[in-house]
Image (spheres, grey):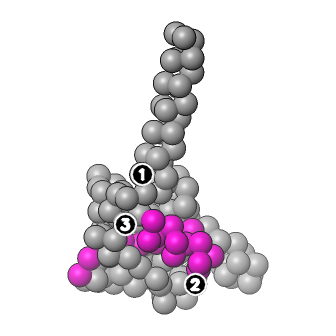
Amino acid sequence: MPNRTLRQVVEGQTLISAPADTTVRAAAITMAGHKIGAIVVVDDQGRLAGLFTERDVLNRVVAQGLDPDSTRLSAVMTADLQTASPDKPLAHALHMMFEGGFRHVPVVEDGRPIGMVSARNALGLEIRQFEKELEDRDHIAEIL
């Protein structure tokens, strides 16, 4: 199951991004509207510049007393990111998250983000397959 490549995991995914000069409030509204916990920050050429997460809202904005209407993502994003290439297996990204203590890994190809793997959605297919296997097992038990 975790043998899927990251390209397969992010295939069909709509990547939500914002320029570095976006305000925290605008980014938070976008994140809430898309029900995501992180937004990729890109430069004017579409290259990965950073990542802004719901943890950043809490720890770097609210807890620091910054104004979300005037604070730009560039001031509070994580710029030094660990990323993964699309040819790596899902297990690689999961290991990165576990070892690094973070929940999002941007998938980057030629410096441009093509998707995001999160702890929450990374195992979506695997969880659905597991649930189906349990249902099949219950169904077989009923028949026997």
**Residue 70 on the magenta segment:** no
Q: Quadrant of the C terminus?
A: top right
Could you tell whether 46 is left or right of 52 in the image? left
Dot 1 crowding, Cα within 10 Å, few <14, some 14–19, many 20+: few
Residue with the mark numbered 1: 1
Residue 94, relative to residue 79: is it above or below?
above
Q: Position of residue 40 (x, y in %)?
A: 43, 72
Q: Say which residue appears at 49% left-offset and 52% top-offset.
A: 123
Report, in whole angstroms, how far the alpha carbon at label 3 lies from the one at label 2.
Answer: 30 Å
Task: Say which element carries label 1.
Answer: loop
Residue 10, relative to residue 52: is it above or below?
above
Task: Say which element carries label 2.
Answer: helix
Which residues fall within the magenta stretch?
A: 91-110
**Residue 103 on the magenta segment:** yes
Residue with the mark numbered 2: 76
Foreground pick, 134 / 75: 134
Q: Position of residue 65 (x, y in %)?
A: 74, 81
Classify residue 7 by image quadrant. bottom left
Residue 74, relative to residue 119: is it above or below?
below
Dot 2 crowding, Cα within 10 Å, few <14, some 14–19, many 20+: many
Q: Position of residue 20 (x, y in %)?
A: 43, 82
Name the N-terminal-most of marks 1 and 2: 1
Q: Position of residue 35 (x, y in %)?
A: 52, 52
> Residue 89 — which label?
3
Q: Amino acid at mark 3?
A: Pro
